[in-house]
Image: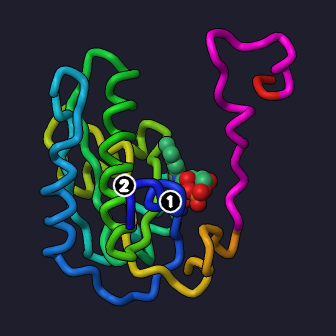
Amino acid sequence: MGVDEAIASLRAVRHYTGVPVPDDLVRAWVDVARWCGSSKNSQPWRFVAVRDRTALVALSAFGEFAGHLATCDVALVVIATPAPYQFSLAFDLGRISQCLMLLAHQEAIGSCVAVFGPHDLVVAAGEVVKAPPAWTAHLAIGFGHPGPQDRPADDLQRVSPPNRLVTEQLLFWDAVPEDATDAVR
Ligand SMILES: Cc1cc2nc3c(=O)[nH]c(=O)nc-3n(C[C@H](O)[C@H](O)[C@H](O)COP(=O)(O)O)c2cc1C
């Protein structure tokens, strides 16, 4: 799979078959994703791979849309160091998460982010994985072989076609034109 296809065909997968994802595969994803850039090369991330079903079910209650963690095969809980700039931290965590999900996708393993919150639930998620003091568990990524509901069709669309803006609504040259109000409202 080329980079173009990998990016365009990556969809959130929230239903899983239960077939195990090998530990070696998870380790290999982290071994590649660790080359991801980060603000001032701070690498503000660590990953806790969780397979224990009781822990996964607990984590699934720590976000409004985290239910898929209860049934995934393995979740990577992304714990983060305190960072001076919230923007950089969020950017870095998003970037590393996308790397991990693309690497899984390349192996036909589905994934979906789960954001934890509000803050007391971020703390609770950190407690499940015994995050060191000052480290925060903002999110986890659930992984698993895609269940029938989430399998790709023959083209880039899946059962639930993604709704995306078209390029003309996204890309402007030199300045946003005044007649682009439909695109930027
Ligand atoms: C920052 C971020 C947070 C997300 N949080 C959740 C979440 O908590 N639960 C969930 O089911 N999906 C979550 N998603 C997945 C998005 O809902 C999904 O990517 C979006 O609806 C587009 O669908 P697609 O990825 O299948 O194309 C998150 C995605 C991003 C980028």
> Against 57, is 18 above or below?
below
Name the amino acid type tagged 1.
Ala
Q: Which of 87 and 115 is in front in this view?
A: 87
Q: Nearer the viewer, residue 22 or 80?
A: 22
At 49% from the left and 61% from the top, the residue drawn is 10
Q: Do the residues labelled 1 and 2 touch (CB within 8 Å)?
A: yes
Kindly indicate the quadrant of the structure image that contains residue 101: bottom left
Disc on the earlier residue, 1 or 2: 1
Magenta residues, start to end = 161-182
Number of numbered discs:
2
At 31% from the left and 62% from the top, the residue drawn is 103
Question: Which residue is disc 1 drawn over?
Answer: 66
Under circle 1, the secondary element is: loop
> Against 68, is 182 above or below?
above
Under circle 2, the secondary element is: strand
> Against 26, is 7 above or below?
above
Pointer 2: residues within 10 angstroms few (<14), some, or many (20+)?
Answer: many
Q: Is residue 150 left or right of residue 25?
A: right
At 62% from the left and 73% from the top, the residue drawn is 155
Residue 31 marker: none
Q: Where is residue 13 in the image (x, y as percent from the top left)?
A: 51, 69
Q: Does the magenta stretch include residue 2?
A: no
Label 1, label 2: how far apart the Cα atoms are: 9 Å
Q: Where is residue 66 in the image (x, y as percent from the top left)?
A: 50, 59
Question: Which residue is disc 2 drawn over?
Answer: 140
